[in-house]
Structures are given as structure tokens and as C-alpha cells.
Image (cartoon, grey):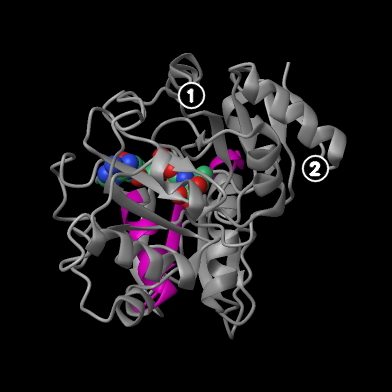
């Protein structure tokens, strides 16, 4: 049975006790729900991989609450420290993950034997209270079965992980709806984007005062070792998903297809299965609603295929495009 925990003091305390006992707890964050366990407890970390069905070669992000504890996680030279300080001042707590050289004591299981570790200070108040109350560093991937769409509500976690996930801390729907931006700061002179997300490449470039090397695109990145987890196919619904340039959606889609617009269409040919992600096409609202709608359509019995508009590149749309393109790969 899965137990839902509220984010009041009692719920946080119980979640913290489960973490300290080496159990996994699904947790709300400002991006998507995570499946958390004590990063320094190998048995707990093993459970995370097994609940998700995730291969052990795909490393996890470690969540913590305060840069003063960085020494437990990372081993940084002066240039790396300065670069991390800049992005932390600008974006933490928040939806940014940073890859840095790891401290030897971080379990190799967490980092899939890499000499780097991905770290993030999340913003969601319930997640922060859980980190503080449990007094642990929390390893947490998104709380979905490996390769499926990330969860943005507690119910999504229960729907797709079921009884495999014993506890879910219910902190309401996620604010961003897309996973954090990941930047590699191992070489601070040549920072590289590993995953586009809520923090844009332009913002990072401004704060670090240098160009950011772009992420390997969804199309060209077949080598998993370049950016582990950034698999070509990921975040995928079971039903076929076809993408169209803005404005190019087929108006007369066949009866068993769902048609997803970014904004509410002007002349609404309201077939039963017409949807839009945001009334005005606001990218933040599109991001918030995207994964939830894809999940709902995947479950809707009378829908056999999904046609969806792809936003034009730029800003948050880069992250939306990245997830949609990966989701559409067969
Ligand atoms: O928003 C998020 O980042 C959510 C919430 C729960 O924090 N977490 C998340 O975790 O999306 P996950 O495991 O689904 O995606 C993390 C990505 C994976 O693609 C993984 O391969 C990559 O980060 N990653 C982790 N450690 C890495 C490292 N040392 N070097 C390069 N990539 C790494
Ligand atoms: Mg994930």
C-alpha cells in the first residue's frame, strides 16, 4: 500500500523518519516529483534504482539545503568554487542542477562510478523541510518508471509507481512542471548545458559572464556517456506522439487522435479531443501542464494517437521542445 503524507509537521516528521530508516519517499519539488533516499545509504540508493527500474549506469542528483555543506559533496578548485558561487547566488534555491567533481566519500552508486556529482538546492518548502528535518542529503531522480513521463502531482506518482513507492509526500502540483536545468561546471571556462530547463541558457551565460556550450541535441545525442540519462527517447507516452510546427497541426485529424495546441485555437473546431496547454500560449503555463496532459491522454481509452504543436525555439520553449522531441521518439 502507498501512504500519502501531508506536508504538515507530522507528515514531514514521518517522511524524515522513513528517510533515516533507509526507505524511499516520493517528494514534491518546484520542478517535478522526485523519488528520494539518503544519498549516503547505499541500500536506500539501490531501492531508488530498483523502484524506478533505472539502469545503474544513470547517475542521480543529490539535493541539499545549504551551500555551506558543499564540502560533503564536491571537491572544488578555486575557479570551480567561484563559478558555483555565482550560479548559486543567482538561482539557488531553485530549478538548477550543477555537475561538479565529486568528493570521494559520495557513494559511487549515486554517481554511477563517475568522478562528478550532480547537485541541487531545491526551493519547494516541503522538500527543504524534509532535508532539514531528516538531516540527510537526498538522492532523487524524477519519480517515474524509467523512460516514462515525469510526475507533476502526487497522484501521478501513485498512478505509475503504485505500491512499489511506499510513501508519497503530497506537496500539491509542481510549479515548473519540467525537470531542472543541468549545467556542467567542471571546466568553469567552458560551462556546458547538459539539459535545458526552467533556467535558460541566456540567464546562465549572463551570470557566468561567458558563453555556455549548448546541450547535445535530442537528435544528435545517441551516445549516453556524453550526457547520461539524456537518452534520445525519454519522457515518452505509450501512444504515438507526432509533432507539428506551430500553426501546422492537421485540422481534420482522424477521429481517434487527440490534437494538442499550445494556445487556445482561434476558430475552435472543437472535436471531442481538442486540447490546449495554455489559454494564451504562455510558455510557463504550457510547461506546467504538458506532462499532466500527456499522461491523461495516454490513459484516455478512446485516444489512439496524439498530435501536438511544437513551440518555436527560445527561452523556456527550448526545454519544452527538448521534452516533446524526446517523447515523440519511437
Ligand atoms: O528537476 C529535477 O532535476 C528532478 C527533481 C526531482 O530534482 N530530478 C531529475 O532527476 O530530473 P533525473 O534523475 O530524472 O534526471 C537527472 C539527470 C539524468 O539525466 C542523469 O543522467 C543526469 O541528471 N546526471 C546525474 N548525475 C550526473 C553527472 N554526474 N554527470 C552528468 N549527468 C548527470
Ligand atoms: Mg527523470
In the rendered image, residue 180 lying in the magenta stretch gets the answer: no
- Horizontal and vertical percent for residue 219? 18, 56
Judge by depth and name the residue closer to the eye, 221 or 269. Answer: 221
Locate the N terminus by quadrant. top right
Helix, strand or loop at label 1? It is helix
Q: Residue at x 54, y 59 (%)?
A: 290
Mark 2 or mark 1: whose residue is earlier in sequence: 2
Q: Nearer the viewer, residue 139 or 287?
A: 139
Outermost residue toward the bottom in this view: 266
Quickly name the residue at label 2.
7
Q: Which residues are magenta?
A: 298-326
Please tell me in which quadrant of the rendered image residue 188 appears. bottom left
Query: In the rendered view, does 99 fall on the left or right side of 298?
Result: left
Identified at 60% across, 56% down, the residue is 30
- Tell me the quarter of the image containing the C terminus: top left
Residue at screen point 30% across, 25% down: 108
> Is label 2 in a helix, a strand or a loop?
loop
Residue 129 in sight in this render: yes
Q: Is mark 1 within 8 Å of ligand 1?
A: no
**Which of the two residues, 180 or 125, is positioned nearer the viewer here?**
125
Q: Relative to 65, is 92 above or below?
A: below
Q: In the displayed structure, does residue 226 sit left or right of residue 91?
A: left
Are there few (<14), some (14-19), or many (20+) residues within 10 Å of tag 1? Answer: many
Check if mark 2's residue and mark 1's residue have beta carbons within 8 Å.
no
Give above or below for 311 relative to 128. Answer: below
- Count every numbered label the image shows and give the total: 2
Task: Tell me the CA gap for discs 2 and 1.
Answer: 22 Å
Residue at x-position 60% and y-position 82%: 280
The disc label shown at residue 48, or none: 1
Q: Position of residue 118 (x, y in %)?
A: 35, 45
Q: What percent of the width, then of the height, locates residue 251?
A: 46, 72
Q: For ligand 1, give the image quadrant.
A: top left
Amino acid at each position: 500500500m502507498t501512504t500519502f503524507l501531508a506536508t504538515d509537521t507530522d507528515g514531514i516528521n514521518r517522511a524524515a523518519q522513513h528517510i533515516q530508516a533507509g526507505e524511499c519517499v516520493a517528494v514534491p519539488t518546484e520542478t517535478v516529483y522526485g523519488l528520494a533516499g539518503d544519498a549516503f545509504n547505499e541500500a536506500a540508493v539501490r531501492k531508488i534504482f530498483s523502484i524506478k527500474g533505472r539502469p545503474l549506469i544513470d547517475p542521480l542528483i543529490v539535493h541539499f539545503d545549504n551551500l555551506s555543506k558543499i564540502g560533503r559533496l564536491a571537491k572544488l578548485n578555486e575557479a570551480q568554487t567561484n563559478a558555483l558561487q555565482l550560479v548559486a547566488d543567482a538561482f539557488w534555491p531553485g530549478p538548477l542542477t550543477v555537475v561538479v567533481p565529486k568528493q570521494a566519500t559520495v557513494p559511487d552508486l549515486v554517481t554511477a562510478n563517475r568522478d562528478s556529482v550532480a547537485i541541487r538546492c531545491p526551493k519547494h518548502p516541503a522538500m527543504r523541510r524534509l532535508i532539514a528535518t531528516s538531516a540527510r542529503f537526498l538522492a532523487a531522480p524524477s519519480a517515474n518508471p524509467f523512460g516514462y513521463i515525469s510526475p507533476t502531482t502526487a497522484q501521478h506518482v501513485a498512478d505509475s509507481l503504485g505500491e512499489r513507492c511506499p510513501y508519497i509526500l503530497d506537496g500539491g502540483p509542481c510549479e515548473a512542471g519540467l525537470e531542472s536545468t543541468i549545467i556542467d561546471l567542471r571546466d568553469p571556462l567552458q560551462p556546458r548545458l547538459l539539459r535545458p530547463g526552467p533556467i535558460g541558457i541566456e540567464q546562465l551565460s549572463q551570470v557566468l559572464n561567458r558563453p555556455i556550450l549548448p546541450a547535445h541535441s535530442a537528435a544528435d545525442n545517441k551516445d549516453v556517456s556524453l550526457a547520461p540519462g539524456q537518452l534520445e527517447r525519454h519522457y515518452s507516452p505509450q501512444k504515438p506522439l507526432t509533432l507539428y510546427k506551430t500553426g501546422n497541426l492537421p485540422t481534420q485529424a482522424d477521429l481517434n487522435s487527440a490534437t494538442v495546441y499550445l494556445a487556445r485555437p482561434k476558430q475552435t473546431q472543437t472535436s471531442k479531443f481538442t486540447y490546449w496547454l495554455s489559454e494564451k500560449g504562455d510558455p510557463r503555463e504550457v510547461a506546467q501542464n504538458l506532462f499532466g496532459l500527456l499522461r491523461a491522454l495516454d490513459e484516455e481509452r478512446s485516444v489512439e494517437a496524439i498530435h501536438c504543436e511544437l513551440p518555436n525555439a527560445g527561452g523556456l520553449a527550448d526545454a519544452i521542445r527538448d521534452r516533446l522531441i524526446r517523447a515523440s521518439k519511437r
